Image (cartoon, rainbow, N blue to C red):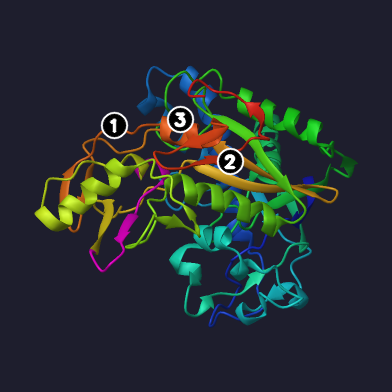
Amino acid sequence: MHIITAQFELVSPMFIAGYTNQNQDDYLTIRPTAVKGALRFWWRALVYPALRQQSANAQDALKKLHKAEAALFGSAASDNSNSGQSLVMLRIPENAQIKDTVKAAEDVSDKGAGLSKYSGCQYLLGMGLYNFKTKLQRAYLNVGTSFSLQLAFKPAVTPEQIAQVKQALLAFGLLGSLGSRARKGFGSVQLLAWTEDQQPLAVPLTKQDYKTAVAELFNQGQRLQELPPFTAFSAYAMADISLSDKTATAAINSVGEKQQRYRGYGEGSKGPHLVSGKPALQLFTDDHDNMLRILQQNAKPVQPRRLVFGIPHNVRFSDNKGSVSIELAQKNQTRRASPLFVHVHRFGQEYVAVQSLLAAEFFPDLAEVKYKGKAYPATAIDWSVITDYLTLPVYQGAQAQADGFTAREAIFKGSLA
């Protein structure tokens, strides 16, 4: 039986449920189903561009993709007698230990990562994981937690399928994350070593080797000259090493502070508006003013430009003016995950924040967006809102300015950059 083994390390705190998640302080573990789900995600992202090139249209390519995925990873139901059977068996021989779980109350202790102490981390954690009154809401697996995977392939697997899984596993180990807020920099995993039938495979250990390996993954999508119908590599993707710091917490905090400053309108009824104690840039005053008109005048909504960062998008006004909740109005679909991925990677004592944009069709056909419970037709997304955030050396607001990612190192420049 063909076997691939891989050793991983967590390079940022991971908010993930254990096998029994009865309370926030359970002993946390990494479940095979979570890893397999991540591998399937990266497999789809990598395989789709080639299938689209071989197909007359996107619909035909999607049918081929679903058929290939079911054949490799199994499916829930099918007319085929082999339905549900995967050609890849995944297990986790070495998992997180009890010592790796940090309880919510331990976050600011010597054992924890200290996420609660930093405004940028608080911002990226969001309301589900952080509360300003009660602080961190859940336990997490700490930086340095190690785990291993074993992938065993059944005899019916083809060499092409094995190669595809290897590429997905590599993408997972270079760009991937697990758990809540996985696209915000938390739960980042790093491939340390891997073997194929006990033969060592190459791992990019230096920053330059890492950039080369990631660029090769993105280059596979170059052939796709249209936005994919789901999150996948294409000519419209891009990736940067945005910044580096001495700890994962510091790197995530820096990303969070810059993103909050870039997106935020600020608070303050007296004097200048502030974002985390700094003058607000107010780069999106039109978003703010349009949402305020909904509250005060019951005006017809104008779709916020910042919606490109993901849905739901909740706009809260200070001075008790109220709030506007924005979500998709599709049946069984109110969310649209962010196309921006933040991943932390370690090179010795240096932790880098890698930000990737995997642009795709943002809305389903005939989509509607719901504002305070009332639906309106969705309009086109402005991708420059994210590309400016990633690439501008200075964010120039009307009353203030702030540095962008001035030390960014481009890995892959797509058509949107």
At a point 50% along the width and 70% down the height, the residue shown is 130
At a point 31% along the width and 64% down the height, the residue shown is 318
Residue 313 lies within the magenta run: yes
Question: If you read the primary sequence from the N terminus, does the residue marked by circle 3 or circle 1 appear first?
Answer: 3
**Residue type indicated by callout 2:** Trp
Query: Depth check: 368 or 84 in front?
Result: 368
- SS category of the residue bearing label 3: helix
Q: Which residue is mark 1?
A: 380
Q: Residue 32 appears in which quarter of the rendering? A: bottom right
**Residue type indicated by callout 3:** Lys
Marks 1 and 2: which is nearer the front? 1
**Residue type indicated by callout 1:** Ala
Query: Depth check: 163 or 300 in front?
Result: 300
Q: Which residue is mark 3?
A: 64
- SS category of the residue bearing label 2: helix
| Residue 83 on image: x %, y % | 49, 49
| Residue 278 in the figure: left or right of residue 353 | left
Q: Residue 55 appears in which quarter of the rendering? A: top left
Residue 325 tag number: none
Question: If you read the primary sequence from the N terminus, does the residue marked by circle 2 or circle 3 appear first?
Answer: 2
Q: Which residue is mark 2?
A: 42
Q: How far apart are the two marked residues, 2 and 3, measured between alpha carbons?
A: 16 Å
Above-or-below relation of 219 to 292: above
